[in-house]
Image: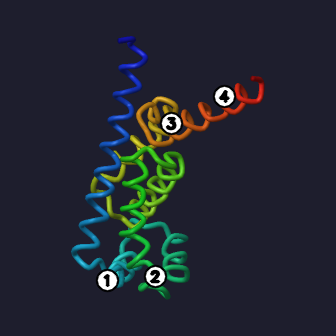
Amino acid sequence: MQARTIFSICVSLARIGAGIQWIREGNFKLMAGFQIGGLFPAIASNTDSPHWYKIFIAHAAAPYPGLFNIVIPWGELLVGLGLTLGLLTLPALIGGLFMDLNYILADMVYIYPVQIACGILLILLRKEAEAVSLDRLIRHYRLHRRKLGKSAKAG
C-alpha cells in the first residue's frame, strides 16, 4: 500500500473519530433534556466572554431558548453524522467549527480548542479526509454512470 493511501485512510479515520465525538455530545444533550436557559445568565455574568458576544447572545439567542434547545443538540448530532459517514463533509466541518467557536466564546473551554484544531486540519486535508466517505462513493457512482451514458451514445 502506498504511503499516500495510508495517510488518506488515517485522516479519514480522524474525521470519523471527530464525528463520533460530535454524535456522543449531541446524543448526551438529547438524552439529558438539554436546556440552554441557564447558560444565558452565566454568559452575561462571566468576565471572559467578549462584550460583543454577550450582546449577540442577549439579543439573538436569549429570546429564543426553545429554538436553541433543539438546534444545539440536533446540530451536534447532524455534524457528527456528516463527519462519521463522510456526507457533506465540508458543511459538517464548518458547522462544527462554528459551534466550537461559540462554546469557547461562551467561556466553556472543555475539549473545544482541540476540536477546532482538528477541524481546521480536516478542512485543510479535505481530499484525504474524504478518501473513505459516502461523498466519494457518490461521486464515483455518478462518474461511472456518466461514462456508461457516453459509451452507450457512442456505440
Residue situated furthest right in the rendering? 154
- The numbered mark, 4 or 2, whose residue comes first in the sequence reads 2
- Residue 154 placement (x, y as % from top left): 77, 24
Q: Residue drawn 76% across and 29% down?
A: 153
Q: Position of residue 1 (x, y in %)?
A: 35, 12
The percent position of residue 42, horizontal first and vertical second, equals 34, 78
Amino acid type of the residue that numbered disc 3 sits on in the rendered structure: Arg
Residue placed under numbered mark 3 in the picture: 136
| Residues at marks 1 and 2, CA–CA distance in whole angstroms | 14 Å
Question: Can you identify the residue that label 2 sits on?
Answer: 67
Real-space Cα separation, disc 3 to disc 2, in angstroms = 34 Å
Query: What type is the residue that disc 1 sits on?
Result: Gly
Q: Residues within 10 Å of mark 4 (few under 14, many from 20)?
A: few
User: Which badge, 4 or 1, is on the more N-terminal residue?
Assistant: 1
Q: Earlier in the sequence, mark 3 or mark 4?
A: 3
Disc 1 designates what residue?
Answer: 38
Q: Could you tell me how far apart the alpha carbons at marks 4 and 1 are, in whole angstroms?
A: 56 Å
Is the Cβ of the residue at disc 3 closer than 8 Å to that at disc 2?
no
Per the image, the residue denoted by label 4 is 147
Residue lying at 51% horizontally and 49% vertically, measured from the top left: 88
* Callouts 3 and 4 close, C-beta under 8 Å: no
> Looking at this rendering, what residue extends furthest in the front direction?
155
The secondary element bearing badge 3 is classed as helix
Residue type beneath disc 2? Leu
Give the percent coordinates (x, y) of residue 10: 34, 28
Residue 71 is marked as none
Nearer to us: label 1 or label 2: 2
Q: Quadrant of the C terminus?
A: top right
Asked whether the beta carbons under mark 4 and mark 2 sit within 8 Å of each other, the answer is no
